[in-house]
Image (cartoon, helix red, strand yellow):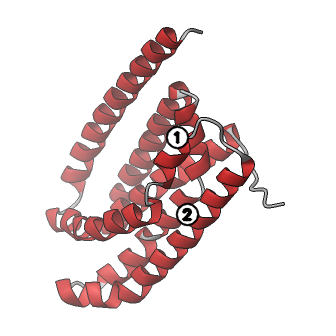
Amino acid sequence: MSLGQQTLSGVSWTLASNLGNKVTTLFVGIILARQLEPKVFGLVAMLYIFFDVSQSFVNSGFSQALIREKHLSEEDKSTTFSINVIMSLLFYALLWFAAPYIASFYDQPILEDLTRFMGLNIIIQAFTIVQRATFTQSLRFKENSIIDVVSTLGSGVTAVILAFLDYGVWALAIKFLLKTVIASVCYWVINPWIPRYF
C-alpha cells in the first residue's frame, strides 16, 4: 500500500472512529443524564483537572518522541516504558495522599474514594504507551480506531447498566476507568510486547 493510500485509509478510519465515538457518547450521555442527578456529573468533573495535569507530566512527551523516532530499538521502547510506569506510580501516589485534601477542599467526602479509584487510570495508560506509539508510527489507524470505538462503547454500555442499578456517581467513575482498561487489554492482545533490558 502506497503512502497516499495509507494516508487516505488513516483519515477514513479516524473520521469513522470520531463519528462512532461522538454518536456513542451522545446517546450514552443522554441516557445517563436522564438517570443520574446533575450533581453526580459535577463530582466527577471536579477531578478531571487533577488527572489531566498528572497525565501530562507522566507522558512528558515520551509518546511523541517514540512516534517521531525513525528506527525504534527495543532499548528505546523498554526505557520509555519503564520511565512512564515509574512516573505514573509516583503521580498516583501523590493523588492517593492528596485525595483527603481534595475532598476537604470541595467539601465532598466521596471525592477521596473517587480520586483514588479513578486515578488508577494513570497507571493503566502507562502500560500501553509503547503499543499506542508504535501503532501510530506504523500508521495502523484501523486498529487504533476499532480499539477506541470498542472501549467507548463497552464502557458506555456498562455505565448505563450501572446507572439503572442505582450506582450513582460510581457509574461514571467506572465508565472513566473501564474505557482505559478495555483499550489497554485490546492493545496487549493485538500487539503483545515484553520489555527487554538486557
Total marks shown come to 2
- Would residue 3 be visible to someone looking at this image? yes
Residue 119 falls left or right of residue 81: left
Give the residue type at disc 2.
Asn
Q: Which quadrant of the figure contains the C terminus?
A: bottom right
**For residue 130, above or below residue 60:** above
Which residue ends up furthest to the right in the rendered image? 198
Q: Contact (CB < 8 A) between labels 2 and 1?
A: no
Q: Nearer the viewer, residue 150 or 36?
A: 150
Q: Secondary structure at mark 1?
A: helix
User: Residue 21, position in %: x, y?
Assistant: 35, 35
Q: Secondary structure at mark 2?
A: helix
Give the residue type at disc 1.
Ile
Question: Gap in Å between the C-alphas at discs 2 and 1?
Answer: 15 Å
User: Residue 188, position in %: x, y?
Assistant: 67, 46
Tag of residue 183 = none
- Would residue 168 be visible to someone looking at this image? no
Q: Nearer the viewer, residue 185 or 93?
A: 93
Judging by the rendered image, the residue that carries numbered circle 2 is 84
In which image quadrant can residue 109 be found?
Answer: bottom left
**For residue 188, above or below residue 71:** below
Question: Which residue is at a point 19% across and 87% down the rendered structure image?
Answer: 105
Judging by the rendered image, the residue that carries numbered circle 1 is 67
Residue 126 falls left or right of residue 193: left
Question: Which residue is at a point 43% across and 13% down the rendered structure image?
Answer: 8
Earlier in the chain: of badge 2 and badge 1, it is 1
User: Residue 67, position in %: x, y?
Assistant: 52, 40
Question: Which residue is at a point 57% across and 35% down the rendered structure image?
Answer: 135
